[in-house]
Image (cartoon, rainbow, N blue to C red):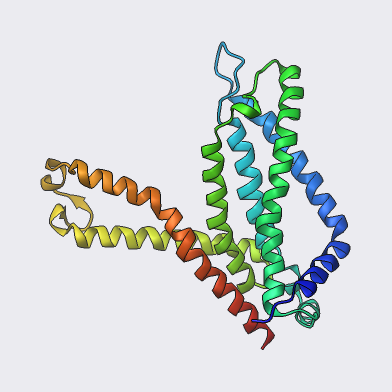
Amino acid sequence: MDFSITRLFNLIKKDFIISRKFLLLLIVSLVAVCALLVFFTSDGVPMNSNQVPPDAGEIVFGVLLIIGGSVITATIFREFRNPPERLKFLSLPASNFEKVFSKWLYTLPFYFLVVCVIFIVGYPLFSSLIGSWIDVEYVHLQELRPKYFGYLGLSYFLIHSGIFMFSLFYNRFPLPKIIVTGFFLAIAGFAVIALLTRIIFYDHFQGFFRGTELMFSKQLSNDFQIWMEMFLVKLPYRFAMIGVPFIWLISYFKMKEKEL
């Protein structure tokens, strides 16, 4: 795995020079989406009140980060859309790791920082302008709940790894293909969980998935409920530490495969 800071810097510099107009358009689009989201969240004001729901800030940040980031990540390898561009990209004077790492930097830490700056500047600005225009009051930036922003950041970290990997699998039309793939993977995941539940708790079912009286007559112990809650809370963090690096490794080898 060959790596050079100089080559990585030159690769990023080249991408910036070539894509500077696209980057400017992207930032302007994100600012416009931020303004629209701040405006749309004002629609949740309850009757006889001018208070915007307290989760308006989380909604704006979540859409910008997760939905916007997913679209950008899915289409980040634009060079693979046609053979000449793909060949040109693969022949660049940089290692496979540097090429993958540069795209990873654009879509994860760099994009996260850009969204944070846009949100920190745009949310109070647009909420103040829109709030005075339609007479509603938003939650101040300082009063937003940091814990939920942490959850959104973790969610993007997990989702990004899978989308980034599949963006290397699909050369043409990656976004719709990734959406369809994610849909079928979700169905398969739910099916596996349902089947395992049916096998493990076989004496609680009648037929295939019809619960018996035994299922509804017993209650889970407090210790088991506490253990299950802790397991579900820790599961995303454990996957972030173990599963995500493994997905990154698959992405790297997929990039190496394209060069062969």
Q: Position of residue 180 (x, y in %)?
A: 55, 62
Where residue 45 sits, quadrant-wise, is top right
Left or right: where 26 falls relative to 225? right
Q: Quick one: which residue is furthest to the top in this view?
A: 48
The residue located at (69%, 62%) in the rendering is: 105
The residue located at (74%, 35%) in the rendering is: 122
Q: Quick one: which residue is furthest to the bottom in this view?
A: 260
Q: Position of residue 175 (x, y in %)?
A: 64, 61
The residue located at (67%, 76%) in the rendering is: 97
Vertical arrangement, residue 132 with respect to residue 260, above or below: above
Q: Say which of 195 and 159 sits in front.
A: 159
Specify whether residue 36 is in view.
Answer: yes
Where residue 10 sits, quadrant-wise, is bottom right
Where residue 99 sits, quadrant-wise, is bottom right
The residue located at (27%, 48%) in the rendering is: 227
Left or right: where 8 falls relative to 183? right
Vertical arrangement, residue 218 with respect to residue 253, above or below: above
Left or right: where 14 falls relative to 129? right
